[in-house]
Amino acid sequence: MTSRTKKTIWSVLAVVIVAIVGFAVYYFTSIYNQLENLHKEGANSPFKNVKQVDQVRTPEPPKWEGTDMVNILLMGVDGRGIQKGEVPRSDSMMVVSLDPVKKKIHLFSILRDTYVDIPGYGKNRINTAITHGPNTAMKTAGDLLGIPVQYYVYTDFQGFIKLVDAIGGIDFEVEKDMHYTSNADKHEYDIDLKKGLQHLDGKTALQYVRFRHDAMSDFSRSGRQRAFLEAVAQKMQTTTSIANLPNILEQVNPYIDTNLSVNDMWKLANVGYQSSFAGSEQVPSMKLLGEENVGGAEVLTVRDPEKLKSYVQDIFNNPPVQTQEQNKDQTETKQPDSASSSKTDKASFTGGNKTTTEDASTQSTTKTRQKEL
């Protein structure tokens, strides 16, 4: 090999290395900047007009020694029809629990009509907790489940739409025809989905996770939301999504608020990437649900709060037979939009007329609860 040839090879390698380093710097700098801006402060905060937002004390985030479970409250809100600066009630509430030791992820969806004690504000539906600020919402959810909730992620309809569109949509099995129209919304949020495998973009995905106009109302909807969130998580782990992460974050950034620091997010992402999904559950569970009429409105109550906390701990330590059956069903229904085969938790809701989490004694709780307190 001549001296000139060697110099040419080294020149090409140098250009390639510079290009790779340049891309890496751009990639991680872009991600860092977007993550840093997810926490909104001052005039940009959705809670800027909430008084006494920090009155409720919440657990300090873990020190990341690799032994503490991390619990994150996910809240999706419907901001239609509210005054500027007003915080809407949460349309959906979920808690994601990450166990860095067992490398397991659990997902709990909280029924929004659950009637609970909201620290400092008396008893009300749990979906009103966020109107008093994220600390109150975290404390309320944590008290219900019997676990410390250290973090929150808050978004609205537009943030959900942007996220699904940014990852290229989701190929998803819609378990039945879904149809609903509303003149009050000028048909902007009408629902019209057909049974079968669909490619859901942001708007049609929102239709799917919002639909509750069937016999099981919020119970079936919470199951659909858990199943779809699992599919989104699977899609986010694909090589394409990881490469496109700066753009994804840029699209959703204006619609998200969180108390996670950038350092927290990096470590959470590392734990999450190494972990496997252990299952999803509805809270309160069907066997612990009660029903009351408060102020002329139907609400859900917890028959035994301590049993509910024990139920949650049993899921962490030794998943019940019900969860194992759900996981078995998950392996039979695969979502083909990622190489890792996203799974739909069909046993947790009424897709295909199949319900495994209810019994005859709790059928009275299936009524649609349209009234608000």
Image (cartoon, helix red, strand yellow):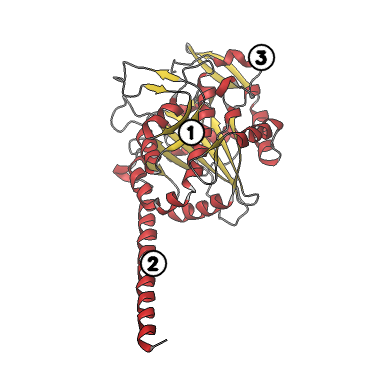
Residue at 46% over, 52% down: 239
The residue labelled by disc 1 is 172
Q: Which residue is mark 3?
A: 361
What is the C-alpha distance between the residues marked 1 and 2? 36 Å
Mark 1 touching mark 2, by CB under 8 A? no
In the depicted structure, whether residue 50 falls above or below residue 151: above
N-term mark: 3 or 2: 2
| SS class, disc 1 | strand
Give me the residue at 30% from left, 33% from top.
Answer: 85
Q: Nearer the viewer, residue 119 or 161?
A: 161
Separation (CA) of disc 1 from disc 3: 32 Å
| Circle 3: element type | helix
- Image quadrant assignment for residue 333: top right
Query: Percent position (x, y) of residue 190?
Result: 36, 21
Seen as rendered, the residue at the extreme bottom is: 3
The vertical placement of 120 against 26, above or below, is: above
